[in-house]
Amino acid sequence: MDRDIFKVVDELFCRRLQVPELDPDAPLVDYGLDSVRAIELVVEMESLFDVHISDEQAASMLTLRDAVAQITASLAVPVGPESGDS
């Protein structure tokens, strides 16, 4: 897991959920994550990291560790004409 990505996502979630720290493996709903905040977080992560997160991918992000893993995986996937679709 990329430490820089983890740090950015952790700080984002702590700020948005208004908690001092998160257990990376605890369900985010335990910290008050609801559907509205979840959408806001996904949009903010997409903007921060310049990635696309599908609804299915977003739904699978149940913990901070899941969110970091999804961002890391999304960053590893080439997008656009350079993805080898020639």
Image (spheres, rainbow, N blue to C red):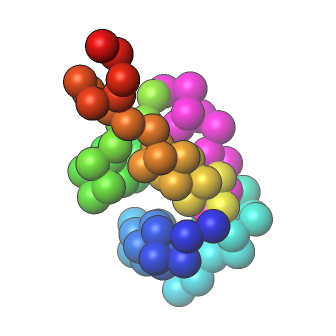
70 within the magenta span: no
Q: Which residues are magenta?
A: 55-64
Comparing 61 with 28, the one in front is: 61
Q: Where does the image place residue 24, in percent across and percent down from the top left? A: 69, 70
Q: Is residue 43 above or below residue 14?
A: above
Please state if 62 lies on the left or on the right of 8 as rendered: right
Rendered-image quadrant of the C terminus: top left
Q: Residue at x 63, y 67 (%)?
A: 1
Residue 36 visible from this viewpoint: no
Residue 15 visible from this viewpoint: yes
60 within the magenta span: yes
Q: Is residue 56 above or below residue 72?
A: above
Please state if 30 lies on the left or on the right of 14 as rendered: right
Comparing 12 with 79, the one in front is: 79
Q: Where does the image place residue 14, in percent across and percent down from the top left? A: 48, 74
Q: Residue at x 75, y 64 (%)?
A: 26
